[in-house]
Each structure stands twice: as structure tokens, then as C-alpha cells.
Amino acid sequence: MDIASRRSWRFLLLGVLLCSLGGCNVINLNRRLIQGSYARMSIVAQERDLTAGRMRYYAGGQGFPVLLIHGFGFSALENWEYQVRALVRPFRVLAPDLYWFGDSLPRPGQAVDTAAAQADAINELLDRLGVCKAHVVGVSFGGFVALELARRHPDKLGKLVLVDAAGLELTQAERDQVSARFGGARDIVEVLIPQDVSALRSFLHTVFYHRRWIPDFVLRQILHEFWKNRQARRRILRGMQNGGLLLPGDLLHIGAETLVLWGRHDALIPPSVGERMARAIPGAHLRYLEESAHSPMLEEPQHFNRLVLDFLTTPRSVASTPEGG
């Protein structure tokens, strides 16, 4: 665990201790701390009304835009805390909450339950903000949205970074591997939307390489976040299970220069998926983070940021190919 992670964890642990005495919400406390940090860097929360509904996003900085697309569970605020600090210096950062997460909600009757629909909404947001082209970084489900953005709106992409990305149909061997790591579970919905505190604790121990002590009252607060907009999130996952994922051939026409980053110990989306993804996307580079599972941007933020910054700031014509492994 690097210095940034240890410092953030000490602050959060202090918050846990204080909240255990005073009954406050640790999740809300952490969000206020992050928002205060963002405000000091002139990164502010904003909203836009789009065709499907209101979308919340965080924006700040100058330079070429970098779009950060978060994964399943929490929102942009928690997902990209360490990356926004590093990227806001050389870039204009845009970090939206996808619909059904954070503070972004579609209007009643608007079905935004697929990665493709989310990608179209992100494309509309970029249009409304006057962004013609942006580098795109997506993690987990956000990586799937990034893939769909690259496939459906290729003119919008500068470079593409896929982090432990969903989107590819798993092989039978990969499905068996994931099931074994999650106690024999075969239903991804039950894995990603835990039923109780015990299931959530087991899930967090599996998707993070470095296990951390979290008291039950905090787990209950986290579980409440996982349960927000639960039916819509179930529809997203069911759609992915029922033929909504991609095959390697669907990635052959992605033209953006692509970096595939993967936690070496990812139990949710195995590293073999990253290998197949990197082989399918023309010219893609693959790198592993050796001390991470499914969330390397949180577990190894300094190493992660260095890889991303080097990739995004190196001109394509002289970019060196990182070694996989």
C-alpha cells in the first residue's frame, strides 16, 4: 500500500472511530472530505439535463479533456479520488456519475439499462459541454461503457484506458474460475448486489487484494449504497448476462490507441479477460498491477497514475509499447 492509500485510510479510520461514537454516516463524511479536497483544486460538481435525464459530473482543470467513467457500486466521487488529483494538473478532468449511480437519475420511463445507452448519454454530455474529443478511462462496468463509446462514437476518443474492464463474454473456464472465487455463486447479480452484511464483507475481501478491517455498522452503510436503485442495477446486470456482452471480434475496429490495465489478482474479471481484450483491440498495450485485485486505481494509486499519465502524455508516434506481465 503506498503513501496516498495509507494517508487516506488513516483519515477514514479516524472518521470510523468518531462516527462510532457520534452515530454519523461514514460514507457521507468521506464524500464531504473528498468534495472539500476537490474544491481546493477548483473541481466542482455540476449537472446537465440530457435527453434521458439529469446527469451529475465533476469538472475542473485546463487542457485536453480526460473523461473518467466509474464502475458498479459507488459513484465517480469515490472511484476516482486519487486520479483526479493527479490528472487535473495537465488535463481538464470530467468525471460523471453514470445513470442509476451517485446523483444521476434518468427521467421516469427512460430506459438507460445498458452500457450502450450509458455511452450514448456520455456522448451527449460531451456534446453539451462542447467537448469534441477526450481521452477516456473506464473501470469495470465503466470500462464496458468506454468500449461502447469507442465503438459507437469513435470520433470522440483520443486515447483509451481500460481498467479491469467488463464487456467481453467470459469463457466457460473463466466463469468457473469466478464462481469458485465467490463461493460457488453462479449469479453475478447476487455477487454485485450483496444480500446482507456477511455477503458484503465476503465480497469486499474477494475484490480487494489488501484486506481491511471494516466494522459492521460501516458495512451496513455501504450495503445501503449498493442497494440504491437496486431494481435498475439488477436490470443492467441481467442484460449483461443475457446476451448483452461483446465478443473479441466486436473490438477489432476500435481505432483509439488503447492501454489495458489489470489487477493481477482480480477475482471478479480474471486477468485472462484483459489478455483477450488486449489481443482483440488493434495495437493495444497490456500492463498488470501486481499488488491489486479489481480496483488498482484505489489499491495502487501512485503506480496506476504514473502508468496512465505516461500513456496519455506520450505522443502516439513515439509511444513505447509497455511490456505485459
Image (spheres, rainbow, N blue to C red):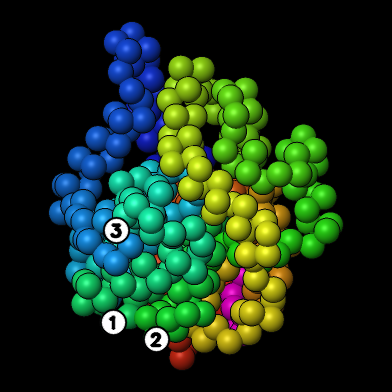
Q: Few, some or many C-alpha atoms within 10 Å of disc 1 (few <14, some 14-19, many ≥20)?
A: some
Tell me the quadrant of the picture where the C terminus can be found.
bottom right
Is residue 102 rendered to the left or right of residue 37? right
Q: Which mark is residue 99?
A: none
Residue 58 drawn in magenta: no
Q: Which mark is residue 155?
A: 2
**Rounded to the nearest whole Å, what is the CA distance between mark 1 and mark 2?**
8 Å
Q: Few, some or many C-alpha atoms within 10 Å of disc 3 (few <14, some 14-19, many ≥20)?
A: some
Question: Between 301 and 127, which is closer to the camera in this rendering?
Answer: 127
Which residue corresponds to mark 1? Answer: 132
Is residue 289 shown to the viewer in this render? no
Residue occupying the point 51% across, 72% down: 148
What span is colored magenta in the figure? 281-287
Q: Amino acid at mark 1?
A: Cys
Q: Amino acid at mark 3?
A: Gly
Q: Determine the secondary structure under disc 3.
A: strand
- 79 up-or-down from 283: above or below: above
Residue 84 x %, y %: 32, 55
Which residue corresponds to mark 3? Answer: 53
Residue occupying the point 48% across, 36% down: 226
**Rounded to the nearest whole Å, what is the CA distance between mark 1 and mark 3?**
21 Å
Query: Which label lies toward us, 1 or 3?
Result: 3
Residue 274 x %, y %: 66, 65
Residue occupying the point 43% across, 64% down: 118
Residue 25 x %, y %: 33, 23
Question: Between 58 and 122, which is closer to the camera in this rendering?
Answer: 122
Q: Amino acid at mark 2?
A: Asp
